[in-house]
């Protein structure tokens, strides 16, 4: 551990300690469950005070990289892949550009999982989607954009991929998507009504029918049309002129 010494760098001392600790873990090929040297040993090897070390370790604990266990002290743990993001992605503190970028990422992500949804949509998943669609159906065709129904349907699509990273990420960005949609509802609603008037509004029932038919191309086209309001919104947001009028 003699090579852990901190060098003079143009970043905070805590940042340097955090970086060196991560390097130590990688260089020593520590695995989940392996013991990590105690605070006294680490502080001495790094040449820093225990207060500085503890602040760096608190960051790693927050990310789930290390944890304390009875009689064993600190051990390496498997972090939540998006644990850090979950703590900072708050629509109330993010700027508009970040909010819009996350909305665009969400659209791109769902377009990217279309084939996986069709491949994995077994009888049980289809039945669960049918229940969601039935609960959300009303005489108002625009009702499928209601927050609770929108969330339930699209969350189930992520579940169908059976990819935990995708499922976790959508749970993190979901509040952002709902925040943007509600804040700019005056922009989205006219688009939805115009699509409905033209007969080109793709509802959750339409998407479910395509999933049942195992129609990959049709489902992808349906998703593109389903997200048409978001796509128009993101295009308008690049100039900002149309959105400013809505605030």
Image (cartoon, rainbow, N blue to C red):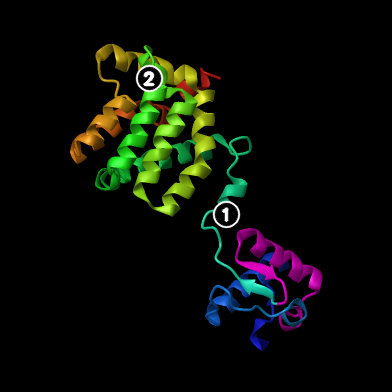
Range of residues picked out in magenta: 43-71
Q: Position of residue 7 (x, y in %)?
A: 68, 77
* Residue 167 appears in the rendering: yes
User: In which quadrant is the N terminus drawn?
Assistant: bottom right
In the rendered view, would you say 39 is above or below 238?
below
Q: Are the two marked residues, 1 and 2, in contact with CB atoms closer than 8 angstroms?
A: no
Q: Position of residue 19 (x, y in %)?
A: 62, 70
Question: For numbered disc 2, what is the local secondary structure?
Answer: loop
Q: Residue at x 30, y 21 (%)?
A: 201
Question: For numbered disc 1, what is the local secondary structure?
Answer: helix
* Residue 10 appears in the rendering: no
Q: Residue at x 48, y 36 (%)?
A: 100
Label 1 vs label 2, nearer the camera: 2
Q: Residue at x 41, y 18 (%)?
A: 143
User: In which quadrant is the C terminus drawn?
Assistant: top right
> Where does label 2 land, which residue?
137
> Where does label 1 land, which residue?
83
Mark closer to the chain start, 1 or 2: 1
């Amino acid at each position: 551990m003699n090579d852990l010494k901190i060098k003079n760098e143009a970043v905070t001392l805590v940042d340097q300690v955090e970086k060196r600790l991560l390097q130590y873990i990688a260089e020593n090929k520590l695995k989940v469950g392996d013991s990590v040297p105690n605070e006294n040993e680490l502080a001495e090897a790094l040449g820093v005070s225990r207060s500085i070390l503890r602040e760096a370790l608190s960051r790693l604990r927050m990310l789930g990289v290390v944890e304390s266990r009875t009689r064993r002290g600190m051990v390496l743990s498997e972090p939540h892949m998006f644990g850090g993001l979950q703590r900072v992605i708050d629509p109330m503190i993010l700027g508009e550009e970040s909010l819009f970028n996350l909305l665009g990422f969400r659209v791109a992500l769902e377009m990217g999982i279309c084939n996986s949804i069709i491949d994995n949509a077994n009888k049980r998943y289809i039945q669960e989607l049918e229940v969601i669609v039935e609960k959300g159906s009303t005489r108002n065709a625009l009702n499928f954009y209601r927050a609770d129904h929108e969330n339930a349907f699209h969350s189930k699509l992520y579940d169908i991929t059976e990819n935990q990273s995708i499922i976790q990420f959508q749970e993190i960005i979901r509040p952002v998507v709902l925040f943007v949609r509600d804040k700019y509802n005056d922009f989205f609603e006219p688009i939805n009504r115009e699509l409905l008037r033209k007969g080109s509004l793709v509802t959750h029932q339409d998407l479910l029918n395509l999933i049942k038919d195992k129609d990959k191309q049709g489902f992808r086209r349906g998703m593109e049309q389903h997200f048409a309001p978001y796509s128009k919104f993101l295009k308008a947001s690049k100039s900002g002129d149309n959105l400013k009028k809505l605030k």
